[in-house]
Image (cartoon, rainbow, N blue to C red):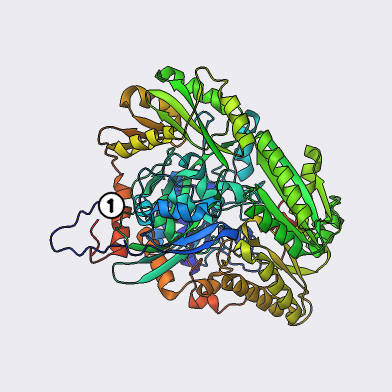
Amino acid sequence: MSLSGRDGDLVVSTARLDRIVEHEATDLTCIVEPGVRLSSLDDALAAHGQRLALDPPGDPTIGECIAEGLSGPLRHRYGAVRDLILGVTVVLADGTIASSGGKVVKNVAGYDLAKLFCGSRGTLGLVVRAAFRLHPRPETTSAFAIPAARPAAVRPLLAELASSKLVPGALDLLWPGALLGLLEGSPRVVEAQAAEALRFEGAEICGRDVWDASRERQRQAAGVMAFAPSELGDILRSEAPTLVRPSLGIAYLDRPYETSASAGLRDLHARLRQEFDPEGVLVA
Amino acid sequence: MTTVAREELRDAAIEELGSAAVVSELEQLRTYDCDGLTGRRVVPALVVLASSAQDVQAAVRLCNRFDIPFVARGAGTGLSGGALPVEDGVVISLQRMNRILDVDLEGERVVVEPGVTNLAVTQAVAAEGYYYAPDPSSQQVCTIGGNVAENSGGAHCLKYGFTVNHVTGLDVVLPSGELVQLGGASVHTDGPDLLGAFIGSEGTMGIATRITLRILRRPESVRTLLAGFESVDGAGLAVSEVIAAGVLASAMEIMDRLTLEAAEAAVSAGYPLVEGLLLIELDGTREQVEEDTDRVIAIFEQVGATEVRVAESDAERSLFWRGRKAAFAAVGRVSPDYYVQDGVVPRGELTAVLRRIGQLAEEHGLRVGNVFHAGDGNLHPLVLYDASVPGELEKAGRLAEEILVACVDAGGSLTGEHGIGTDKACSMPLMFSEDDLATMTRLRRAFDPAGRANPGKVFPTPRLCGEVPGPYRMHPLEKAGVAERL
């Protein structure tokens, strides 16, 4: 994470908070500290045939994933960090330590501060521990690419995909160029899905490096734009995105893109900061 | 509130909203005095029947002017007293706001008003092969607004997640009367996840007036199986093994002998009369379901299932489910009164906690039936008692509380889906420290500095926690067989 502090600011590093506190394999849950990198968590979980279904570009720490609300191609099926997080322990600006949620997969007791802290960029406090829901690791993975270069052809293609038997684990539009789909499961399931994909005109089966290309575009994007999935055609025509997640309504652009929050929302954010950090100790 | 003040409030409401939107006669107000937690009743000062976001804003502003609280209400099927009125407060009913505003199949989004029922969303898109995933068992009557307030789940949330995973945007009338948009049709948001924080806040942060939902394509194939075991533990072990094998079932439900017999007597589902019955549903592509079916059958045989049945038709599939869904109400046949507990445990602790519940039941000399969402560790112990026996109600209350303690001690939660509401506000300290609760309160103050939105819910208050709940009474919808307590 980039540090934007000024001279004289105190930097609190969570790099040494790097333990996997608990992995309940039978419950498909884990508790980790914020300094754990996704790659090392993935290694530990792989030994049990499990994974955290979160694949943002690079190899961020869990703390970064939460603070920035990160996600990658897998968001299509598994959601973002806010959909996988089960609970947090946070330290507030005044030193208060507080927990919310828990480590069980189903829980509606009290407010969900874990979700609140997703995307909060350190403005509300510091996450020192987080619990996550895990998923079984797929036995086999494959991918398909279908050519997609004209805006007018994308909607019919997506409609055809929706009415097919394909159930991709991720769906990325590299623009202009190709619609990528991730296939996961047992060899038999993946094979059947691949055959289904090949019925599309120009479709090819590709290796896992196509996802590196997609995640690289995400990493290099200078701006992120939210759009209504039904407006995809317009976005492709007028915004020239480099990568689009059509089901999610997210377009990555090679230029900065400022979203202007409404006055009401800005007010709400300000009141939240006022409540969590009235002295303004935390540097955003 | 004095009679004069009450009349003043009524007149102001009629002036703002029109007389057709205002309920003020005592007899009519009584209709709103409770939700699905029928043991607690409070008659509100006034009920406003909102037809639009503007009506909601007007009602909320009226409450600000009179400095009184408000409680949002949908169908009133909640089981934790989340929609219990506040004395001298206004109930804002959202049932008239029942329009589906937009169906966008291509974008896989549906936009609704809060009074639309859960099932109506699926019905609106079913013909095109889509559905809305969260399926609380009250889905025929419960509203999407209520689902948002409670972050509702259902039997299939094991695979597909809860309301919070399926709502992409909300228009919210804040307790100030201001309208803000959280999220939209896209899942991308900037800054803290206020949408995620709002969903499940039980009406204490404002009122959602427009809700954007994500819909899913129906899976190609669905298969439902029953497996009988010589003990509930055996069924629990089967669940653990299915999870360990990496099979992602869409639902896994367990019933013990007591609830099984009651359900069988009620709906004749043709269940085998065993000590532990597991109902499992698998969905996905045809190949996936075939493969998963083979794997779970092998697991069932390995862990000693006495019988395995695969539903051969849609009719048989719904019969399997009908018994499960009727189980709660059916227990009324074997006990004059019962209390439905809702706790969660880590799935690895299922058998240990079930044994503990058995011990506790024995110690208190009461029967406990178990019918629950085993796949996600969500227990629904049914504490059976007879309110006409002096002291038994209190005993049942203590037993239900001790079961919750056992869940929390095992690393679980006070509630998996019914919510805290008024029912469990006093139990919050079992799970959360004072600092935890104070930190949650900071979030609440950011939304509702004056504490006008649904006060007395979620958080323990000295006034509330001195009270003792009354005996359980069946909700009218439950009595009519329209809704069950799941």
Q: Nearer the viewer, residue B200 or B245?
A: B245
Q: Is residue A32 visible?
A: yes
> Is residue A278 rendered to the left or right of residue A211?
left
Q: Nearer the viewer, residue B317 or B450?
A: B317
Q: Nearer the viewer, residue A259 or B211?
A: A259
Q: Position of residue A15 (x, y in %)?
A: 31, 61
Residue at the disc numbered 1: A1
Using the image, determine if residue B15 lies above or below residue A124.
above
- Graded by Cα atoms within 10 Å as few (under 14), some (14 to 19) or many (20 or more), the crowding at tag 1 reads few
Q: Position of residue A178 (x, y in %)?
A: 43, 24
Q: Position of residue A219 (x, y in %)?
A: 32, 39
Kindly identify the residue that appears in the image at 32 percent across and 38 percent down: A224
Kindly identify the residue that appears in the image at 42 percent across and 38 percent down: B186
Q: Nearer the viewer, residue B437 or A13?
A: A13
Q: Position of residue B386 (x, y in %)?
A: 78, 74
Q: Quadrant of residue A234?
A: top left
Give the amino acid at mark 1. Met
Using the image, determine if residue B356 lies above or below residue A127.
below
